[in-house]
């Protein structure tokens, strides 16, 4: 059986700076995979490359067996990969509801629509007509997740959804993930918060300076192994 | 009463300036592209109207049935085939390319139509007026221009705030990379913005061509009025652009009333005054980081 998503020998560059070195990663359908690593390890770059914001050679990224490395972001989201970008990136001049509706732009059908998202995040319904920028950080994160869900993804990539949020708010945001997985959505979560990442994931990858330094199931990894992979020697 | 008359006429003409400016405002709003060829595209649409009128015998306003779709398609092709390649982090390439385009359009029109003045004739409608009092009359034609400007800007606002395309325009304006993540094809969106801008230009062009003489070199002055209307109104607000057009029209009318030679000057002075007093315009909406 082919993996839902597989990268092989994936590299990425910002100009002359190489951010990813031959990254091999597989995600099976229905899994939750966490990618951990320190600041600048290449986690966000990896997600941005998968989504087509950074270019890659076609064969380096396969989705359901199809080479998608050179497709545009619009083509990739249409195939069912959605990103919740780091820093939320809500559209500032759009209302909360309009931000959610942007997820429909790609035209994919599925279980997620406005009412489902409001059921998942009830506080968004009350503020649906307010500017997205008027929300608190946690609510903005929920709106950003909702917007990605509105594309009805088969694979949801979450980039640092705990960033800048209070612990209690992080708990609320993470509480939504089981409901999303219950729809059969495959999850990739990028986190700096290791405990948070290990708690939600079936499998974890650790990146360090653009390379995969560790891969395994959380239960089988020791703290020492993770520390070594995370910080290097 | 002369003054009231002048101000009313000026306000109505402001509708024409707003029509000049709406397309410029839309293109800048969606993709931060300053189209230096905007005025020349207006003149190009006026010549297209002239060709259609001469070839088909349609009246100038009916010629819009052909001119609007042709300019819409031309706008799409122009953006998709040329201007999209100038967009990026740097503001200079679009300026240079549209400046070049401006020169090309002017010279092509000169080659094709000579430097002679042209005008479209709309018969009695041009001079017919509605008598309010013995001293005050409102011309039907300027009144129609103003109503059209209201309708066009109302439709553009509806498109921007009530349709999926408008949402894509605004999201792209906020953050084009993030918009692409949700399926917005930005090259298509940019091309639709330019196509709509040129459709609006066509309407403005026919009104212009019925109102005054035009020749291949008429474009840059229209660009200037359009710029002034957009800046007076405040970037990103189409109703503001209408207000900017009215301010410009009224200022010109007042200037002309004081001294016939001051018409243009008064408009530019009003523009400078607004820049000094409210540098972000009267009704700014666009917030740029």
Image (tube, coloured by chain):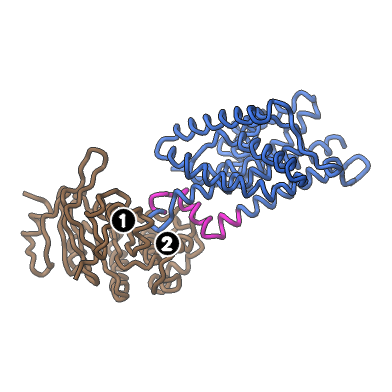
Is B66 on the left-hand or right-hand side of B91?
A: right
- Dot 2 or dot 1: first in sequence order is 1
Residue A135 falls inside the magenta stretch:
no
Q: Are marks 2 and 1 on the same chain?
A: yes
Q: Report the span colored magenta.
A: B157-179
Is A90 on the left-hand or right-hand side of A172?
A: right
Q: Main secondary structure of the magenta part?
A: helix
**Chain that the image shows in brown:** A
Chain of the residue under label 2: A
For label 1, the residue is A51
Instruction: Point out residue A69 in the picture as x, y percentages from the top left corner.
Output: 27, 54
Is B121 on the left-hand or right-hand side of A18?
A: right
Res A226 → quadrant: bottom left
Res B101 → quadrant: top right
For label 2, the residue is A106
Q: Identify which residue, B96 or A120, lies in the foreground.
A: B96
Give above or below for B66 relative to B230: below
Residues packed near mark 1 inside 10 Å, few (<14), some (14 to 19) or many (20 plus) = many
Q: Identify which residue, B56 or A38, lies in the foreground.
A: B56
């Amino acid at each position: 059986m082919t993996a839902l998503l597989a990268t092989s020998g994936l590299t990425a560059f910002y100009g002359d700076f190489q951010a990813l070195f031959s990254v091999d990663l597989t995600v099976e359908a229905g899994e939750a995979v966490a990618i951990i690593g320190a600041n600048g390890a290449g986690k966000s770059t990896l997600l941005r490359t998968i989504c087509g914001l950074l270019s890659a050679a076609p064969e380096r990224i396969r989705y359901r067996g199809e080479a998608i490395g050179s497709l545009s972001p619009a083509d990739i989201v249409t195939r069912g990969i959605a990103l919740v970008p780091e820093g939320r990136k809500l559209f500032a001049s759009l209302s909360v509801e309009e931000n959610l509706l942007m997820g429909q732009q790609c035209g994919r059908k599925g279980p997620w629509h406005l009412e489902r998202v409001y059921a998942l995040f009830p506080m968004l319904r009350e503020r649906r007509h307010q500017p997205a920028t008027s929300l608190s950080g946690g609510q903005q994160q929920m709106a950003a997740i909702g917007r990605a869900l509105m594309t009805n993804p088969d694979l949801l990539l979450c980039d640092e959804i705990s960033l800048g949020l209070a612990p209690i708010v992080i708990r609320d945001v993470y509480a939504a993930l089981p409901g999303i997985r219950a729809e059969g959505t495959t999850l990739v979560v990028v986190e700096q918060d290791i405990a948070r990442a290990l708690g939600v994931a079936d499998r974890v990858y650790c990146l360090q300076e653009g390379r995969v330094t560790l891969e395994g199931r959380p239960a089988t990894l020791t703290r020492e192994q993770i520390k070594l992979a995370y910080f290097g020697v | 009463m002369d003054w009231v008359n002048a101000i009313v006429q000026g306000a109505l003409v402001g509708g024409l300036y707003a029509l000049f400016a709406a397309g410029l405002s839309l293109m800048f709003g969606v993709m931060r592209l300053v189209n230096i060829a905007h005025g020349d595209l207006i003149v190009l649409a006026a010549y297209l109207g002239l060709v259609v009128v001469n070839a088909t015998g349609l009246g100038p306003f009916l010629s819009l049935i052909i001119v609007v779709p042709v300019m819409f398609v031309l706008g799409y092709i122009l953006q998709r085939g040329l201007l999209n390649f100038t967009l990026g982090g740097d503001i200079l390439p679009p300026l240079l390319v549209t400046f070049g385009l401006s020169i090309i359009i002017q010279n092509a029109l000169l080659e094709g139509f000579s430097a002679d003045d042209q005008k479209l004739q709309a018969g009695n409608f041009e001079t017919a007026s509605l008598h309010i009092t013995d001293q005050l009359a409102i011309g039907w034609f300027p009144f129609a221009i103003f109503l059209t400007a209201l309708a066009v800007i109302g439709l553009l606002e509806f498109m921007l705030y009530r349709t999926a395309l408008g949402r894509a325009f605004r999201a792209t304006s906020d953050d084009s990379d993030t918009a692409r993540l949700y399926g917005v094809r930005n090259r298509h969106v940019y091309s639709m913005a330019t196509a709509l801008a040129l459709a609006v230009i066509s309407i403005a062009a026919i009104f212009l061509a019925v109102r005054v003489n035009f020749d291949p070199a008429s474009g840059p002055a229209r660009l200037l009025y359009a710029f002034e209307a957009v800046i007076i109104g405040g970037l990103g607000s189409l109703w503001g652009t209408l207000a900017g057009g009215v301010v410009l029209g009224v200022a010109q009318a007042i200037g002309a009333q004081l001294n016939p030679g001051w018409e243009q000057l008064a408009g530019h002075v009003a523009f400078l005054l607004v820049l000094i007093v409210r540098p972000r315009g009267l009704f700014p909406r666009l917030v740029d980081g």
